[in-house]
Image (cartoon, grey):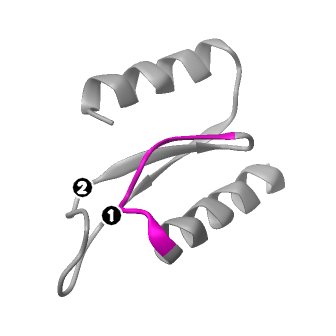
Amino acid sequence: MNETALRSTALRWLAEGRAGMEVQVLSTRGSVPRGTGTRMLVAADAVAGTIGGGHLEQRAIEAARRWLAAG
């Protein structure tokens, strides 16, 4: 998802009153599918964008949803 689409999704979620979090890759080591600065948005029932897929992305989504549920 490009920057414009990600920003558009964030604005739409805000307008809908939908809680969401931004997940961003802050640093990398070795071979990685996406680089530093890659972002995605996570809501309780949706994800926009990707930080590279796989196990790490799934863990990031789960962590973001725990934070959202905690308020």
Q: Secondary structure at mark 1?
A: loop
Q: Which residue type carries mark 2? A: Gly
Q: Which residue is mark 1?
A: 25
Q: Which residue type carries mark 1? A: Val
Disc nearer the start of the sequence (2/1)? 1
How crowded pointer 2 is (Cα within 10 Å; few <14, some 14-19, many 20+) is rated as: few
Which residue is drawn at the image coordinates 59% and 20% (left, top)? 14
Q: Residue furthest bottom?
A: 30
Q: Measured from the top left, where is residue 33 in percent x and y?
A: 25, 68
Q: How many marks?
A: 2
Q: CA distance from mark 2 to mark 1?
A: 5 Å
Marks 2 and 1 close (CB-CB < 8 Å): yes
Q: Is residue 18 left or right of residue 58?
A: right
Which quarter of the picture shows residue 20?
A: top right
Which residue is drawn at the image coordinates 69% and 34% (left, top)? 19
Q: Secondary structure at mark 2?
A: loop
**Eyeballing the image, is 55 above or below 7?**
below
Find the magenta span and give its range.
46-54
How crowded pointer 1 is (Cα within 10 Å; few <14, some 14-19, many 20+) is rated as: some
Q: Measured from the top left, where is residue 54 in percent x and y?
A: 47, 71
Q: Is residue 33 magenta?
A: no
Q: Measured from the top left, where is residue 53 in percent x and y?
A: 43, 63
Q: What is the quadrant of the N terminus in the image?
A: top left
Q: Measured from the top left, where is residue 29 in percent x and y?
A: 21, 85
Q: Is residue 49 magenta?
A: yes
Which residue is drawn at the image coordinates 35% and 24% (left, top)? 5
Which quarter of the picture shows residue 63?
A: bottom right
Q: Which residue is mark 2?
A: 37
Q: Is residue 46 left or right of residue 11?
A: right
